Image (spheres, rainbow, N blue to C red):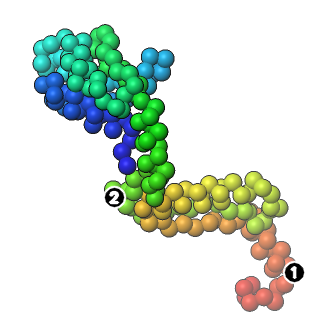
Amino acid sequence: MKTIPELIAEELKGAFAAAGFDEKYAMVTRSNRPDLCEFQCNGAMACAKVYKKKPIDIANAVLEQAKDSTMFSEISAVMPGFINIRLNPVWLAGHIQKISEDKKFGLNEAAYPETIIVDFGGANVAKPLHVGHLRSAVIGESVQRLARYMGHRVISDVHLGDWGLQMGLIITELQERKPDLVYFD
């Protein structure tokens, strides 16, 4: 499923083309000024260099073509050539409804599935167990479930324990207590 900026860009591509400009300039981003708008298109400024027109004139021409769209509650052209956009809440509610009805809740499967190896640590068998040991296990399990959900092949392993000093101490203790075990020949 496409993102909201991609859907807005599709809508603006038609407006750019109808106004006589190349639709590649219909690039949409989230606004860095949410007090002014939710999304913005700065394509009129790049377009102005090619078409030798004022950016605000291009923005107004595109605006004229897009003003009747049900996607927007407000669309305006402001100096020097920004196109400011606010989404129509009714359109947004409909889009959210489509996402909720989608089997994957709008998440796109990986276009090129990969094999992902997740190696995450488990509890150290040579130390007392506590809730902190669960953190990496929960994170690792979550990462592999998300990757599988997106269509990737996942190989995972829980790394148990510490093969350093603590394991050496356990082996030494076992050897002292049970020297007759076959492992110590």
How many other residues sit within 10 Å of disc 1, few (<14), some (14-19) or many (≥20)? few
Determine whether the residue tagged by mark 2 lies in a helix, strand or loop: loop
Of the 4 image quadrants, the one containing the C terminus is: bottom right
> Looking at the rendering, which quadrant does residue 36 occupy?
top left
Q: Is residue 39 visible?
A: no
**Rendered view: 115 above or below 57:** below
Q: Is residue 3 visible?
A: yes
Residue 131 left/right relative to 29? right
**Rendered view: 61 above or below 24:** above
Residue matched to label 2: 112
Name the residue rendered at 85%, 79% in the picture: 176
Compare residues 101 and 136 and report the one nearer the observer.
101
Q: Amino acid at mark 2?
A: Tyr
**Rendered view: 176 above or below 24:** below
Residue 103 left/right relative to 84? right
Q: Earlier in the sequence, mark 2 or mark 1?
A: 2
CA separation in Å, label 2 and label 1:
55 Å
Q: Which mark is residue 151?
A: none
Q: How far across and how far down the image is residue 142, in percent?
A: 58, 57
Q: How far across and how far down the image is residue 99, in percent?
A: 45, 48
Q: How far across and how far down the image is residue 67, in percent?
A: 29, 23
Q: How far across and how far down the image is residue 95, in percent?
A: 42, 42
Q: Amino acid at mark 1?
A: Arg
Residue matched to label 1: 177
Name the residue rendered at 69%, 54% in the picture: 135
